[in-house]
Amino acid sequence: MTRENSLVSTQWVEDNLDADGVVFIEVDEDTTAYDKGHIKGAIKLDWTTDLQDQVRRDFVSKDQFSALLSERGVANDDTVVLYGGNNNWFAAYAYWYFKLYGHQDVKLMDGGRKKWELDSRELVSEIPTRPATSYSASEQDTSIRAFRDDAVAAIGVQNLIDVRSPDEYAGRLLAPAHLPQEQSQRAGHVPTSLNVPWSKNCNDDGTFKSDADLKALYAEVGIDESKDTIALCRIGERSSLTWFVLKELLGHANVKNYDGSWTEYGSLVGVPIALGDEPGDA
Amino acid sequence: MCGAKEGGLSLDGVNVAKEAVIQGQVLRGDEPVGNAYVRLLDRSGEFTAEVPTSASGHFRFFAGEGDWTLRTLAPKADPVDRQVRAAIGSVAEVTVSI
């Protein structure tokens, strides 16, 4: 993967608003943002209701994902272009999710909703209707999804990239100040994990930094490209963005997103935890 | 952002005694800017949070004690940085003109 086939610009989107076989989907942390105005023709996915099982702590199943996209009018061969607020935070999560269920052609709009707005491009209120399809999701591609045992096994062996803020990593905070729910039982980080806050991947306008800057960022913290990598955060969404950077933009070979992340790991009985600003020992 | 009133956001429901609130309004001349983005940067310049302004141009953060920078991005305007000091139990009101 490269920047060319995983990212499109806001100008590309404006030029392709009416293109056949292209579906624009807004996925926002603020699930009401779409209702205040969205890119013409775009549909919405709600990460809290559409993409999460409403009983178990897990994703919707392959069959539920197939039914969801069929009902929303997304076809298997469509080009799906995702965008959202907050540096594409939740759009990147949806990107990873589409890849997990085997959708071939997915892209992020570089800069997301913020760049679109800062460019003074049009937002509309009309909600499009798309004819239903017969979408068929693949089995989950677990080569990009890490589970708790993978995280434990990676201590001192693989690259563990913790993308939370420095205060969460050190154990001084359990969650971002504006998101008080979904806390773990214990604070801290997985020993030997490196802290690279997700926001460091992006420019102020929400676009991704250049490949050269991103490479320098990860080289500086000492990521070992000969090893596999697991990205984690608190609930697996911010780490989706870092997964996107490492896997899709920089082309690292084996990168997984640990969606259970710290809310799961920090509630496990008996696993090692490091406190403070340093990675700690295996 | 409901409950916004002239002169500042309503603090109904906020336990000010426990929070270090930074809030304010983005204006272009006398007009509120409802499509701006305000970023909260810590004392080292590191990104901490970002919120879009409300229709009335208002924004709010629950920060920690200390010095912060508000960086405001809006269409057709250069970014504007404003320094602000937050303290638990007080509300730092900031008007950002772009």
Image (spheres, rainbow, N blue to C red):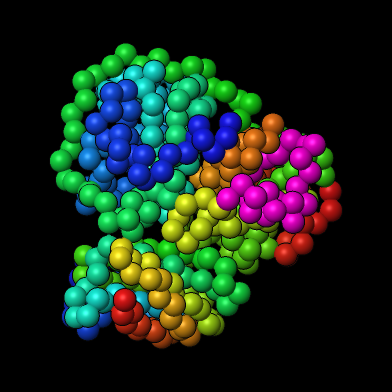
Counting from the top left corner in percent of width and height, residue A168 is at 61, 61
Is there any visible trace of residue A267 in the rendered image? no
Counting from the top left corner in percent of width and height, residue A55 is at 41, 34
Q: Which residues are magenta?
A: A210-231
Q: Is residue B70 magenta?
A: no
Counting from the top left corner in percent of width and height, residue B72 is at 39, 71
Quadrant holding the N terminus of chain B? bottom left
Residue at image coords 84%, 48%: A282
Asked whether, in this view, residue B49 is left or right of residue A266, the answer is left
Q: Is residue A222 magenta?
A: yes
Residue at image coords 15%, 41%: A126
Q: Quadrant of residue B2?
A: bottom left
Quadrant holding the C terminus of chain B? bottom left
Asked whether, in this view, residue A96 is left or right of residue A164, the answer is left
Residue at image coords 63%, 26%: A143
In the image, is residue B10 above or below residue A90? below
Asked whether, in this view, residue B45 is left or right of residue A49, the answer is right
Counting from the top left corner in percent of width and height, residue A151 is at 70, 39
Is there any visible trace of residue A175 in the rendered image? yes
Residue at image coords 48%, 22%: A104
Asked whether, in this view, residue B66 is left or right of residue A47, the answer is right
